[in-house]
Amino acid sequence: MAIPVEEWYYEVPIVTRTYVTASVLTSLAVQVGFVNQFQLYFTFDKTFYDRQYWRFITTFLYFGPFSLDFLYHMFFLVRYSRMLEEGSFRNRAADYFWLLFLSSVALLVLSPLSNVPFLGYSLAFTLVYIWSRRNPLIRLNFIGLFVFSAPFLPWVLLGFSLLLNNHFPMSDMMGIAVGHIYYFFEDVWPSERISGGRRWLKTPRIM
């Protein structure tokens, strides 16, 4: 008989489940000393000149050591990635994987403009932004202080992060930028007459 945690785990859609599992295992590997976190972050020098190509992936998988902050980010990732995959990407796992791939590439391209070593937070923020724009009628409550519409969620979280950390959250802003680019070309541009209904970010048939 399956235990509640096991039931919940297998109820999570496949792409979200795989990403979260890989993230937890990556943090576990660092925690037990199997790898060092400095072997995981993305830089052009280490990745290309030293041919450490795994950094393309591990930069999105490491969310820090096991802690309350780690649990918060895992909850954050599971919640919005799952809602997005079960919502507008229901029964479209290939399309959702393609979204993650495109977003990851865009964040890697933007990474030299910032000092963000790990891009998992930015990718999670990209998912939050896309979900919020595709669910404009949903009302949210921020820690009991005020109620707002879903499209304001990324900005509320960004402002909250700014207050907590006392510095501009560049990783969050990168996620918003990439999320907006995807949203524009997938949800706005095809509806414009000049576009001819063309979807530039359409999932390739090979996927």
Image (cartoon, rainbow, N blue to C red):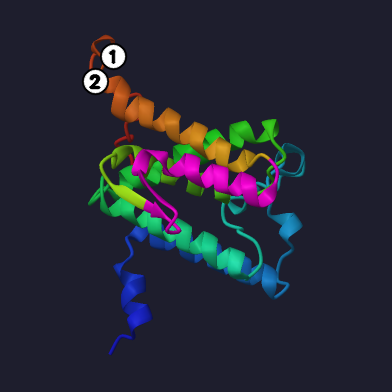
Placement of the C terminus among the 4 image quadrants: top left
Viewer can see residue 10: yes
Q: Is residue 12 magenta?
A: no
Kindly report which numbered mark, 1 or 2, lies closer to the viewer in this rendering: 2
Q: Does the residue at mark 1 contact the one at mark 2 (Cβ under 8 Å)?
A: yes
Residue in the foreground of this view, choosing between 181 and 197: 181
Tag 1 residue:
195
Tell me which amino acid carries mark 1. Answer: Ser
Residue stretch in magenta: 141-167
User: In the rendering, which numbered label is found on residue 116?
Assistant: none
The quadrant holding residue 88 is top left
Does 123 sit left or right of 30 as displayed?
left
Residue in the foreground of this view, choosing between 79 and 51: 79
Viewer can see residue 119: no
Tag 2 residue:
191
Q: What x and y, as percent, mark residue 46?
A: 75, 44
- Which residue does the image show at 61% across and 32% down from the upper left? 110
Furthest toward the bottom, the residue is 1
The quadrant holding residue 99 is top left
The secondary element bearing badge 1 is classed as helix
Q: What x and y, as percent, mark residue 168?
A: 66, 39
Above or below: residue 19 compared with residue 179: below
Q: What x and y, as percent, mark residue 81?
A: 39, 53
Q: What x and y, as percent, mark residue 53?
A: 65, 46
Placement of the N terminus among the 4 image quadrants: bottom left
Q: Is residue 165 magenta?
A: yes
Does 36 sit left or right of 198 as displayed?
right
